[in-house]
Image: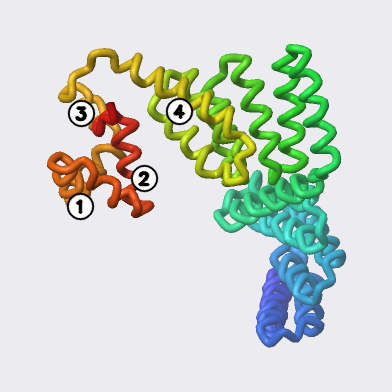
Amino acid sequence: MADDEEAQAKKKAELAKDAGGAAYKKRDFEEAIKQFQLAWDTWPKNIAFLTNQGAAYFEQGDYDKAIEVCQNAVEQGREIRADYKLVAKAYGRIGSAYQKKGDLPSAIKFYEKSLSEHRTPDILSKLREIERQKAENERLSYLDPEKSAAAREEGNTKFKAGLFADAVKDYTESIKRDPSDARGYNNRAAAYMKLVAFPEALKDVNEAIKVDPKFVKAYIRKSNVLLAMREHTRALEAIQEAAEHDTERQHTKEISQQELHCQQAVFAARGTESQEETLQRAMRDPEVASIMNDPVMQQILQQAQGDPSALVDHMKNPVVRSKIQKLVNAGIIRTR
């Protein structure tokens, strides 16, 4: 008789669950909540009834109630040794409710609890998304241009005192406070150069240029970094870029001196290199090889062999001028 009563109770609970599911689909959440509660009261051995009720509260926007119901589902599930997948679902729904409430640390906590019970792609994706969101919120809340300027000035003071490693820390703080200010990257590059950390310095000047493509000082520093790395041709190209962006001619003297140093380094490195040796070396540069294999450029170079003055006309085209300058810097076109 007891078995029959149990079977009847289970059947009644399943019918209530189905009724709750139908109401849920119709977005009649009040009725769904009522039916899922009936299912649980009738057969308190399946925490899916509670997690479904939690989902209905969630859809209503009652996130606190959704959390309460799903926490009860976890507690009840532990007592009746429910399937770990159902416990994971309850934890996942708690995490989603906290996410909706804007409590990202709690959301992360419960998503992690869910994954510890049962790893699913859906919860893992939600966890990664919210971790990114939390990191971005923290980054944005840390932004402060005034504090960035103060950190940069502190870095300048330490740089002048020869405390280059400490200056790097201050410049890094300046960048974190305001990554849109190219000066932080450029100053840190100077400190890295003093520490002979040339790859890091090059990365920073490139970032400074990316942030502010018209920042002349970054091109000048890039040239200095590349020269120190014995990348003489690239250093020459960087200082030529500086000259192009120095439209107000505020750095004319510094640029001219640096360009001369680069040219001297280029010629010294090539020594008595023959034209054939120059070509072989230059062609190892993918950009030079691309220019040399360009049919239009081949025609221009062939024309220039018979009439060097023809290059003057071609140089009026900015694209062609850039390519010709690249070949001059590489030594393929010799100006003396």
At x 53%, y 38%, the residue is 242
Contact, mark 1 vs mark 3 (Cβ under 8 Å): no
Left or right: 289, with 192 as reference point: left
Which image quadrant is residue 151 in?
A: top right
Circles 4 and 3, Cβ within 8 Å, touching? The answer is no
Does residue 185 appear anywhere in the picture? yes
Decide which of tag 2 and tag 3 comes sooner along the chain.
3
Q: Nearer the viewer, mark 2 or mark 3?
A: 2
Marks 1 and 4: CB-CB under 8 Å?
no
Instruction: Tell me the number on the disc at residue 235.
Output: 4
> Mark 1: which amino acid?
Val
Q: Reading the chain from its start, which is encountered first: label 2 or label 4?
A: 4
Mark 1 vs 3, N-terminal side: 3
Residue topped by disc 3: 279
Question: Does residue 150 appear to the left or right of 128 in the view shown?
Answer: right
- Please say if the residues under marks 2 and 4 sit with CB atoms less than 8 Å apart: no
State how far apart marks 1 and 4 are (Cα).
27 Å
**Residue 245 in the image: x percent, y percent?**
55, 44
Residue kind at label 2, given as amino acid type: Ser
Q: Which residue is mark 2?
A: 322
Query: In this image, 98 relative to 188: left or right?
Result: right
Is the residue marked by circle 4 packed among few (<14), some (14-19), or many (20+) residues within 10 Å? many
Q: Residue 163, relative to residue 46: is it above or below?
A: above
Q: Nearer the viewer, residue 138 or 10?
A: 138
Give how far across and how far down residue 35 sits, in percent: 77, 80
Quadrant housing the N terminus = bottom right
On screen, residue 301 above or below 169: below
- The percent coordinates of residue 100 (x first, y second) are 78, 63
**Residue 108 vertical position relative to residue 96 in the rendered view, above or below:** above
Measured in 3D between alpha carbons, the distance from the residue under mark 2 to the one under mark 3, in whole angstroms, is: 18 Å
Of residues 183 and 317, the one drawn nearer to the viewer in this rendering: 317
Reading the image, the residue beneath label 1 is 296
